[in-house]
């Protein structure tokens, strides 16, 4: 094993242990939670090593980094998640490699994603990003739609060609009533998920929790956790 592969294997094992422990504590089966490794700022070589170590779900948040990385790893059986705030001028590129876009938070983005998916002859999974720090009709500090906007966006995704409504995503808010209360935030997201599934039974994916709060997300019922730093290490400062 290379030094980097050994390092990644050790980190993955530690994260796996955390997820398994959280599942056990919550009375859940380990296979109910999917690990998504967030590979932003790290090279395609790391993605290849992660694949060798069994990782199949990876995430990126900037198209300019993700597109060449996905191309360099196109021979691998990976599921690519786009998790960053997405501008409409990047949609055509993202639709070429992403399997799931987790940051859907406005109608204009949905129509652009639909057109790009149809053009690329692909189906894109979509998660509505919910901002628990947003007032009615507003977007959150870290992207996302306020809770009262979920149903409108979900309905738009569900009827859009080339798109598939997979569920909901959130980022633990830094401000507002849920600041510092990650598990309460994730439990609230699960309530929204339950309501969403009443009208869209297949939209059962709930993406919540990152390196620092994955345990709280698992306890709340998240189906997917997005972990970067705990696997890959502290990211270099950009700029």
Image (cartoon, helix red, strand yellow):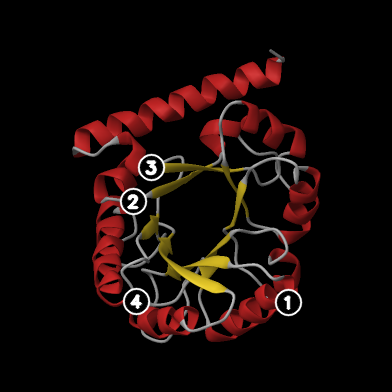
- Of labels 2 and 3, earlier in sequence is 3
User: Can you identify the residue that label 2 sits on?
Assistant: 222
User: Can you identify the residue that label 3 sits on?
Assistant: 214
Instruction: Give residue 226's mark.
Output: none
The reply to whether discs 2 and 3 touch (Cβ–Cβ < 8 Å) is no
Would you say 166 lies left or right of 30 here?
Answer: right
Viewer-nearest residue: 1 or 181: 1
- Of labels 3 and 1, earlier in sequence is 1
Quadrant assignment, res 18: top left
**Mark 2: few, some, or many residues within 10 Å (few <14, many ≥20)?**
many
Would you say 207 lies left or right of 40 here?
Answer: left
Residue mark closest to the camera, 4 vs 2 = 2
Q: Find residue 92 and report its horizontal and vertical position in percent.
A: 74, 72
User: Can you identify the residue that label 1 sits on?
Assistant: 119
Q: Find residue 130 and report its horizontal and vertical position in percent.
A: 41, 69
Name the residue at the top extreme.
Answer: 1
Q: Which SS class for mark 1?
A: helix
Give how far apart the Cα atoms at labels 3 and 1 are. 36 Å
- Of labels 4 and 1, earlier in sequence is 1
Q: Is residue 28 above or below residue 139?
A: above
Viewer-nearest residue: 63 or 195: 195
Residue mark closest to the camera, 2 vs 3 = 2
Give how far apart the Cα atoms at labels 4 and 1 are. 31 Å
Residue mark closest to the camera, 1 vs 2 = 1
User: Can you identify the residue that label 4 sits on?
Assistant: 147
Q: Which SS class for mark 3?
A: helix
- Of labels 4 and 2, earlier in sequence is 4
Q: Find residue 121 and report its horizontal and vertical position in percent.
A: 69, 71
Quadrant assignment, res 5: top right
Residue mark closest to the camera, 3 vs 1 = 1
Name the residue at the front extreme.
Answer: 121
């Amino acid at each position: 094993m290379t030094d980097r592969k050994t390092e990644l294997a050790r980190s993955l094992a530690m994260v796996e242990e955390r997820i398994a422990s959280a599942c056990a504590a919550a009375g859940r089966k380990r296979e109910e939670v999917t690990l998504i490794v967030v590979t932003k700022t790290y090279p395609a070589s790391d993605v290849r090593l992660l694949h060798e170590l069994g990782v199949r779900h990876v995430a990126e948040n900037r198209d300019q980094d993700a597109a060449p990385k996905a191309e360099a790893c196109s021979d691998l059986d990976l599921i690519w998640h786009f998790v960053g705030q997405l501008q409409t001028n990047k949609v055509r590129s993202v639709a070429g490699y992403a399997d799931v876009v987790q940051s859907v938070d406005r109608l204009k983005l949905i129509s652009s994603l639909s057109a790009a998916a149809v053009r690329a002859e692909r189906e894109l999974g979509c998660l509505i990003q919910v901002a628990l720090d947003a007032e009615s009709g507003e977007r959150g500090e870290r992207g996302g739609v306020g809770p009262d906007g979920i149903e409108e966006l979900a309905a738009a995704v569900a009827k859009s060609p080339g798109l598939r409504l997979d569920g909901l995503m959130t980022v633990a808010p830094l401000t507002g009533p849920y600041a510092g209360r990650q598990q309460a935030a994730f439990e609230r997201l699960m309530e929204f998920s339950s309501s969403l599934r009443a009208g869209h039974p297949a939209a059962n994916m709930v993406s919540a929790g990152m390196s620092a709060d994955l345990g709280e997300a698992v306890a709340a019922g998240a189906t997917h956790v997005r972990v970067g730093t705990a696997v890959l290490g502290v990211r270099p400062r950009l700029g």
